[in-house]
Image (tube, grey):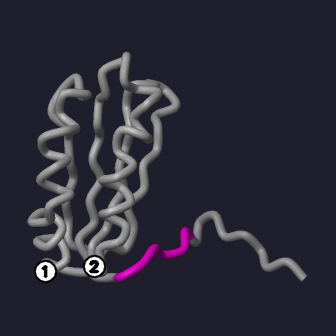
Amino acid sequence: MIFITAKFRVLPQHADQWPEITREFTEATRAEPGCLWFDWSRSLDDPAEYVLVEAFRDDEAGAAHVGSEHFRTAQRTLPPHLAETPRIVNVKVPQDDWSLLGEMAVPAKD
């Protein structure tokens, strides 16, 4: 899978509205057949920073996402709400879902 984490520094006056600003883009991306997940989180330390964790099944799914109409629309509509260019980590991972964090295993409950 293609695993992507991106940090978005939003202009302070738009930070509280960011989930609504990105709603259509988020919903359309989540509906893509090759999207495994597409989840936003807000930083606890900086309320103007959002982190996007996303994954796509394979290169074809990633290309379909970047080539989609909703991605092109986001390229036009999201930057005016940003304080800077988002930062990204993009890697291929040889798995297709989350792994369990064994170091913090939760015992089975009866």
For the residues labelled 1 and 2, say whether their Cβ atoms are less than 8 Å apart.
Answer: yes
Q: What segment is highlighted magenta in the picture?
A: 96-101
Considering every residue shown, the one lying at the far top of the view is 13
Identity of the amino acid at label 2? Gly
Residue 12: say if magenta: no
The image's mark for residue 34 is 2
Name the residue located 27 percent from the left edge and 73 percent from the top edge: 56
Residue 97: say if magenta: yes
Question: Does 56 appear above or below 25?
Answer: below
| Left or right: residue 91 compared with residue 50 | left
Residue labelled with disc 1: 60
The quadrant holding residue 83 is: top left
Residue 30 location, x and y as percent? Answer: 37, 67
| Left or right: residue 68 compared with residue 47 | left
Task: Determine the CA span between mark 1 and mark 2.
Answer: 8 Å
Residue 86 location, x and y as percent? Answer: 20, 38
Say which element carries label 2. Answer: loop
Name the residue located 29 percent from the left edge and 74 percent from the top edge: 32
Name the residue located 22 percent from the left edge and 38 percent from the top edge: 78
